[in-house]
Image (spheres, grey):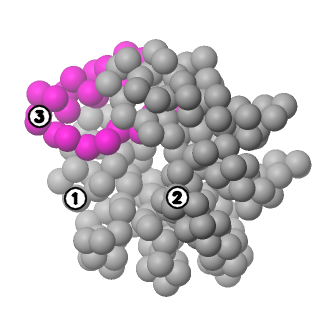
């Protein structure tokens, strides 16, 4: 499974980045506009949701539980400083997807008990797109978390995130991780649509 986290650059707007990911075949999009207001995010989210619906892609919004409910997105991704997952579940009910950010097995366990549907686990390595970075995990960090999950009989999709490049993906998948989340790796490529297609082929089982 490949997730694309929207980003903007000098070349591409948030919607451009989502369009590129969808054209490249990605079917899981997260709109992440950390420092924007709901009023700034809403029109972009509505357009992005329609773009995702047109091709049958899943559309998740970072952090904004009320906006997810208001526009009917597929779900929300909650970071460590966002609304707690169990509170978001009360607001959204059972039909919405809720993902949580984790850096340790303890985080994963807490999110599992709070009814998260998937975990964004990282960072794999240092990344410039995130402020206040948690400790870098690397391959050993993922192996340890996956092993502890097996021992605890916790079954949740774990998505690796944080500074991942195409070259890293085969080794990450071998750790038992279920998916990869990418952002700038795609947008920095000379041909982002072709790069997305190439990476989707790499992530296929």
Residue at 76 percent of width and 38 percent of height:
192
User: How far apart are the two marked residues, 1 and 3, measured between alpha carbons?
Assistant: 16 Å
Q: Which residue is mark 3?
A: 152
Which mark is drawn over residue 114? 1
The image shows residue 175 at horizontal and vertical percentages of 35, 20
Tag in front: 2 or 1: 2
Within-10-Å neighbours for mark 3: few <14, some 14–19, many 20+? few
Residue at 72 percent of width and 56 percent of height:
19
Within-10-Å neighbours for mark 1: few <14, some 14–19, many 20+? some
Of mark 2 and mark 3, the one earlier in the sequence is 2
The image shows residue 89 at horizontal and vertical percentages of 29, 70
Count of numbered tags: 3
Residue 58 included in the magenta stretch of the image: no
Closer to the camera in the image, 143 or 60: 60
Q: Which of the 4 image quarters holds residue 140?
A: top left
Within-10-Å neighbours for mark 2: few <14, some 14–19, many 20+? some
Which mark is drawn over residue 156? none
User: How far apart are the two marked residues, 2 and 1, measured between alpha carbons?
Assistant: 25 Å
Label 2 with label 3: CB-CB less than 8 Å: no
Residue 5 appears in view: yes
Closer to the camera in the image, 188 or 196: 196
Horizontal side, residue 201 vs residue 10: left or right: left
The image shows residue 56 at horizontal and vertical percentages of 51, 61
Q: Which residue is mark 2?
A: 57
- Span of residues in magenta: 138-162
Horizontal side, residue 30 vs residue 84: left or right: right
Residue at 46 percent of width and 15 percent of height:
171
Residue 142 included in the magenta stretch of the image: yes
Tag in front: 2 or 3: 2
Q: Is disc 2 placed on a helix, strand or loop?
A: loop
Of mark 2 and mark 1, the one earlier in the sequence is 2
């Amino acid at each position: 499974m490949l997730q694309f986290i929207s980003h903007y650059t000098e070349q591409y707007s948030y919607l451009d980045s989502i369009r590129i990911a969808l054209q490249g075949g990605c079917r899981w999009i997260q709109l992440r506009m950390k420092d924007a207001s709901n009023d700034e995010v809403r029109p972009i989210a509505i357009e992005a949701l329609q773009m995702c619906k047109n091709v049958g892609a899943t559309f998740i919004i970072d952090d904004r539980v009320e906006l997810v409910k208001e526009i009917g997105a597929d779900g929300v991704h909650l970071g460590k400083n966002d609304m707690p997952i169990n509170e978001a579940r009360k607001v959204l009910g059972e039909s919405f997807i809720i993902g949580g950010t984790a850096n340790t097995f303890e985080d994963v366990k807490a999110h599992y008990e709070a009814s998260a549907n998937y975990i964004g686990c990282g960072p794999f390595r240092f990344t410039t797109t995130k402020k206040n970075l948690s400790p870098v995990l690397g391959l050993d960090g993922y192996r340890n978390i996956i092993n502890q999950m097996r021992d605890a009989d916790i079954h949740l999709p774990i998505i690796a995130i944080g500074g991942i490049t195409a070259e890293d993906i085969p080794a990450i998948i071998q750790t038992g991780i279920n998916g990869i989340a990418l952002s700038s790796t795609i947008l920095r490529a000379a041909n982002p649509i072709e790069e997305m297609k190439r990476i989707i082929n790499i992530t296929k089982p």
